[in-house]
Amino acid sequence: FFCVIVRYRAMLHALKRSVGYSLARKANTKSVAGNLSRLLSSKAPGFDFMSGEHKASICSGLTFSTGLIGHLSESSVMCSAGGSVVHAVVNSARAENPESAFLPLTVDYRSRQYAFGQFPATLSRREKHGSDDEILVSRCIDRAVRPLFPKGYVDEVQLLVTAHAADGVHDPTIAAVNAASFALMCSEQPWYGPIGCVRIGLIDGELRVDPSVADMERSTLDFVYAGTEGRALMVEAIGQQIPENIIVQASKLADSAVTEIINTQRNLVKQMQAKKLAQLTGADSTTDVTTAAKKGFFSVPQAFADAVDALGYNEAVQVYSTGVADKVARGRAEGQLRNQVIEAVKSHPEWGTQPVIVQAMAVDSMMHKAFRAVLLDGPASSSSNTTARAVANKEVRRSDGRSTNEVRPISSAVEVLPSVHGSSYFARGDTHVLSTVTLGSLENAKAYIPLDGSGEEKKHTFMLHYDFPPYSTGEMGNATATNRRMIGHGNLAEKGLRPVLPSIEDFPYAVRVFCECTASNGSSSMASACGGTLALLDAGVPLKAHVAAVSVGLVTGEEVAMTFGESAETGSGNSNGRYTVLRDITGSEDYNGDMDYKIAGTEQGITAIQLDVKLPGGVPLHMLDTALESAKEGRLHILHRMQTTLSAARESVKPQAPKAEMVKYDVDRKGMLIGPRGEMKTYMEELFNVTIDLDTTEGAAYIFGKDGAAVAACAKLVQDIAVLVKEGDTVTATIQAVLDYGAVVTINRAQQALLHATELTHDKDLFRKSPSEMIKVGQRFNVKITQVDKATGFIKVSRKALLDANTSVPDLIRPLAPATHSGFAQDPDTVPTFAQNEPGLPLKITAADFPTSPVRPYTKDYFSKHVVPDKDVKAAVDRQNQLQQTVVAPTAKASFPDGRTAAHSPRTPSHAVSAEGTS
């Protein structure tokens, strides 16, 4: 309590120095008492972190509150969904002498590790913010709120959103976007919100609003939507080849779901009686520039705008209607016109006194107006000449000469780099992308902890990295740093390709695609998705389908944009106004247009979506539906061109690429593969020069190496050791030892089985003979697995189960004669080089097949625990020893890899290996 008093006494002294004693005295009676009560109540049991001066809950689970923490900021709000809590604050600073009309808005999303109950994975154990996932959430928030700031507002605004708790059920990302909206509503910013944000999932064929994190694991569509009523501001989606009609339904469902969120924010603001800064103070007497109190808000006087239009509007119409396909030539003409108009304004005695930012805004407005007029009305009717306006509209042509639904010329090639694992070059107009593929082991997979609160570490075996060097636009710049734009574009292209990738069971590799934009004139992220597809196919990755991507733009009439009065509730705009959809937009069309709708997909449907909006108030939904259809036609056209370059994945990976195989095994045999202290796994890795991954998928071993033959050999050994055969399988057996009632046969290098004498043949005349009179060690023949005991590993096989009882009698078995029919194999001299023991020693596997360590050699305990025991075979061997009917006399020796030998007595049980001094 004393520390709290001291703290607020210091604050009061600061208030006295800045605003006077009277204001400080008022703060003493109100602010100190109020904040002390909050601080003291926070220590009481049952403290509600979401309590505050103003609080409201929504039936969807969202709760907003204000006034508890961050009270010194311009605005501070809390938003919770279940047990997930986020905090959003807004602060701003006055821009000094701004020269650009670009809004300096900074959005940062931070996810605390304590929100997941974890320590940060850094040496200092402190959070290190700025991860890719945090940047992607920041970009989503930025794209959702930026279109609702008025043009001409240039103050520096910082929006900081922090995730303080995540319950693993409700994704904090959705709450973060809604918290950002409410924080801006409570701030002094001239922001014309609010907005609402929801997630739509497609689970079991049903669209659901804000499913849980666990349910989203089963969803085939992840559709994040933010918007105002009836208009979209931001879309981020990934789907399993979703048809366009499902996307349309998801958009409508999301639009209806955000209405309640928007109304709740408006009601809370009314309760707070917040004074929005949109109430303007009038005009400057010298410049006639309208400014807002305390804020850097600039607008262009109508008389000045008309003067600028008179200087360059007609020339701008000519620039945007020349039909020159070359980007450099168009850019040079546009830049020259812009500079000419600015110089004319500066030299004008009346308009030259305008602030630099107002001059720039006026010129930009004139260029945008000409651009829109050409695409909406055609170049003839766009002219200021009244006679020309009366001319009937002709087909609209874009600045590069294309029609509105035309895709730029496409060229592509694969295997453009000789020594990489896969490569391609994709060019669409002036946008070119070089894509490469690198294959690696699963150890190269990217480990991450998702921000949805699940808390479980996951791995990405596929990653796509996008690079945008400065030379791609013919400029100089920093060629080393990775910025937010690169991360966002790479993530979008990765989302487009991820749904068509094979499973790791079918393709056990970690895959990295690197897309370098070598020339850029719009839609470079979509070109990266196309180029990445071709590079993956060239690398031998068996994709489910080709993926193509295209950006769709939008140009609307002035009547479509929302215009606002003193509050957002008075905003108006004609959603049914004029508009034109542009397929495959260029950089200029992206800059001057109202929307960049990026869509990737296959012939079957959509795999990824990203929507960027510049239109004030958002894009009406029916315009998005039109854009979807245009994107589908463009996507199919691009897919056809890509398939002519490479129609399917190569049959195998390149010779210079590493090799990988996957072997499924019985989970209870994993200990046999690992061995004590991992010695068995290490031995196989060193023997074959491979890497074995047993942790990615339970019950699957992934073997990775440079030599394909070594990888195959290691896979065979893993299969022999840890894969238990199934009843009904037919395998080739090799006689390891002949018993008085049958034989011990090996079915692979690590498993043996019992072949009873009654299962040898259907010929009853042979039953009276001893098995040693019919078969001998080393013979091979096919047998059928008749019994498998998973608990003990005991296996029984039958030869006669594969023979016809009628045609196989009499069975022409001759004592010790090589069999040439009835299922028997060839002469023992031609038996393949299996791991063989000396006659009479039915061991499970030779000692040479197991590694040994100079520190701790293998003992009989290891073999008894980790080698499958055959109780029936052991009993038979013991009985043979007692009757002295087995091969006896000399002591057999089995060699270890380091040269030591282990003596084996014929009376030693088949699963035990004992040697004095080596136990």
Image (tube, helix red, strand yellow):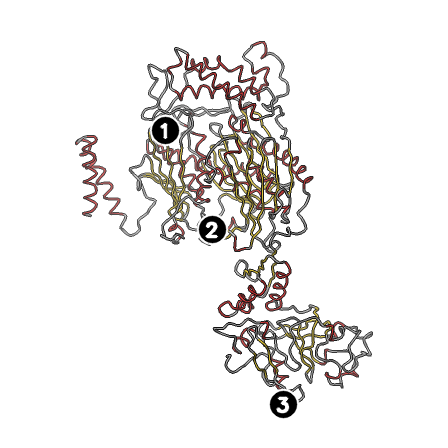
Name the foreground residue: 540 vs 700: 540
Name the foreground residue: 654 vs 136: 654
- Rendered view: 867 above or below 246: below
- Rendered view: 432 above or below 37: above
Q: Mark 3 = which residue?
A: 882
Name the foreground residue: 664 vs 223: 664
Name the foreground residue: 185 vs 883: 883
Q: Which mark is residue 448?
A: 2
The three-letter code of the residue at mark 2 reads Tyr
The three-letter code of the residue at mark 1 reads Asp
Q: Quadrant of residue 732?
A: bottom right
Q: Quadrant of residue 90?
A: top left
- Rendered view: 218 above or below 28: below
Q: Position of residue 573 (x, y in %)?
A: 48, 24
Q: Earlier in the sequence, mark 2 or mark 1?
A: 1
Q: Mark 1 = which residue?
A: 155
Q: Which mark is residue 338?
A: none
Question: Which residue is pictured at 61% across the width and 64% down the height?
Answer: 714
Question: Which residue is pictured at 21% across the width and 41% down the height?
Answer: 8
Q: Position of residue 899 (x, y in %)?
A: 56, 75
